[in-house]
Image (spheres, rainbow, N blue to C red):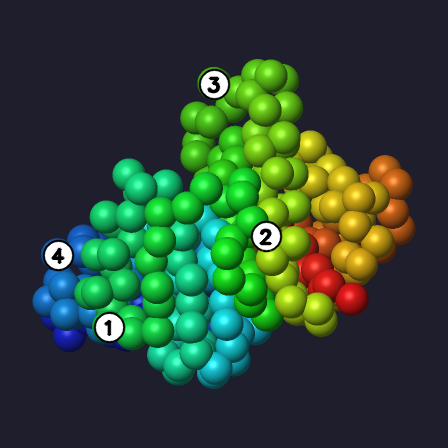
Amino acid sequence: MKAPKDLKLSYVKDTVIPYMKELTKPISIGRTIEYLGGYIHSQSLASAIPPIVLDPKPWDTVYDATAAPGSKTTQIAMLMENKGTIFATDKADRLRALRSNISRLGVLNTVIKAWDAKKTFPFSYNKALLDAPCSALGSHKYAWERLTPGIVKTLSLVQKDMIKAVFEGLKENGVLVYSTCTVTYEENEGVIEWLLENFQNAKLEPINLPIPAKDGEGKEYSDIKHTKRISAKDAGEAFFIARIRKV
């Protein structure tokens, strides 16, 4: 993001991602002219990693299955140079924020649609991002207080339905990136191992990240080491990321 003109340069510093800056002092970014004009957007460093792992190119066709409020969608559009097509979907009641950010940031290559990500999307695509709804243990300080084994189990079932639907719509040789901002095995490696068990044409690919990360740890598949876990200490939020190719 660009440093707002009304901020001293000493308030920002470089990060490992060239187009992202870190604020060194609390600033109301959303109240600046630069934010309202679409020149900057607030996003955590960890949240910016899944689109980088997806590596979208101009003229790709990308499916962003749970897109709202749109930080990753708009980042993908930037990486695609506003070319190609992005299908950005979410629940109908979440689309307002998505539309607002896409409009504010000048995104032109995105089609927005209310859609249940547990259903196969009617159009095919060569790249897909599923930043799945999760228990948010890596991003919300008090998420542990409302967590129960039943909630984790329910979320895991939803995530499996979603990754199945997104993978089924992916073109051959296409790439799917799965991510969450939580830390449970059931919502992370467990979902990926379930996919590998049920889809023989799903193959995990190695991930090279610009920030420190630990290899995932699975119970059934040695390739689960290709998934990555990012800590909140290194990137502001804890994230899990997997890159899957449809062979």
Q: Amino acid at mark 4?
A: Arg
Of pointers 3 and 1, the one earlier in the residue sequence: 1
Q: Is residue 185 left or right of residue 38?
A: right
**Mark 2 or mark 3, earlier in chain:** 3
In the drawing, what numbered circle is on residue 106? 1
For image coordinates 25% across by 49% down, the residue present is 97
Name the amino acid type tagged 3.
Answer: Arg
- Of the numbered discs 2 and 4, the one sitting upstream in the chain is 4
Residue in view at x 42 percent, y 62 percent:
87
Q: Is residue 13 above or below residue 242?
A: below
Of pointers 4 and 3, the one earlier in the residue sequence: 4
> What residue is disc 3 on?
146
Where's residue 127, x and y in %? 57, 67
Q: Residue 159, position in %: x, y? A: 60, 38
Q: Which residue is mark 2?
A: 166
3D distance between C-alphas at marks 3 and 1: 38 Å
Q: Which residue is mark 4?
A: 31
